[in-house]
Amino acid sequence: MKFAVRKRRAPSIIIVSLVDILTILLIFFVVSTTFKKDQPEVQINLPESKTSSAKPAEIEHAIVSVDAEDALQLDGKDIAVDELQAAIENLPPTRKSALVLKADEKASFGIIIKVMDALKLAGVKNLPAFTQPPSK
């Protein structure tokens, strides 16, 4: 008795669905990496100023933040006032020249003076501060 021997096909991978998945992943990663955060996530109530103006962000600012509990952050990372001068001195010159102070209106005046003192000792000559226009 003769049995019919079937030829076995080599298994094949269906590439169409893989290409679709890879395309979707590529689009997701491209879109998610292009969203750039301008400022670190720190909850600060900025003081109001009648002379404040919104300026376009031409350069990436290094931001020194002081919140309502007098906690100090440099670009979103916690830092002590004593370590601030050394951290600013280690910044590249372009970021050092674009340093900005962002202090909560409830922050104590003493900590703001200590921060400004440390920045001056680190060689920061121009120190703009973030404010917001008065609410109407």
Image (cartoon, grey):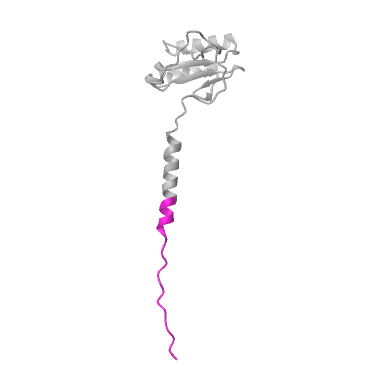
Which residue is farthest right?
A: 69
Query: Left of 103 or right of it: where is 19?
Result: left
Q: Which quadrant does the N terminus fall into?
A: bottom left
Q: Main secondary structure of the magenta part?
A: loop
Is residue 6 located in the magenta-colored stretch of the structure? yes
In this view, the residue in front, 125 or 103, is 103
Quadrant housing residue 66: top right
In this view, the residue in front, 121 or 111, is 111
Instruction: Give the tally of numbered discs.
Output: 0
Query: What residue do we see at 42% from left, 11% from top?
Result: 126
Query: Left of 81 or right of it: where is 62?
Result: left
Query: Left of 129 or right of it: where is 69?
Result: right
Is residue 90 located in the magenta-colored stretch of the structure? no
Q: Which quadrant does the C terminus fall into?
A: top right
Query: What residue do we see at 42% from left, 42% from top?
Result: 27
Residue 82 lies, in percent from the top left, at 53, 16
Residue 134 lies, in percent from the top left, at 54, 11
Residue 50 lies, in percent from the top left, at 50, 8
In this view, the residue in front, 58 or 80, is 58
Which residue is farthest bottom?
A: 1
Residue 65 lies, in percent from the top left, at 53, 19
Which residue is farthest front?
A: 136
Residue stretch rendered in magenta on the structure: 1-20
Query: What residue do we see at 56% from left, 19% from top?
Result: 44
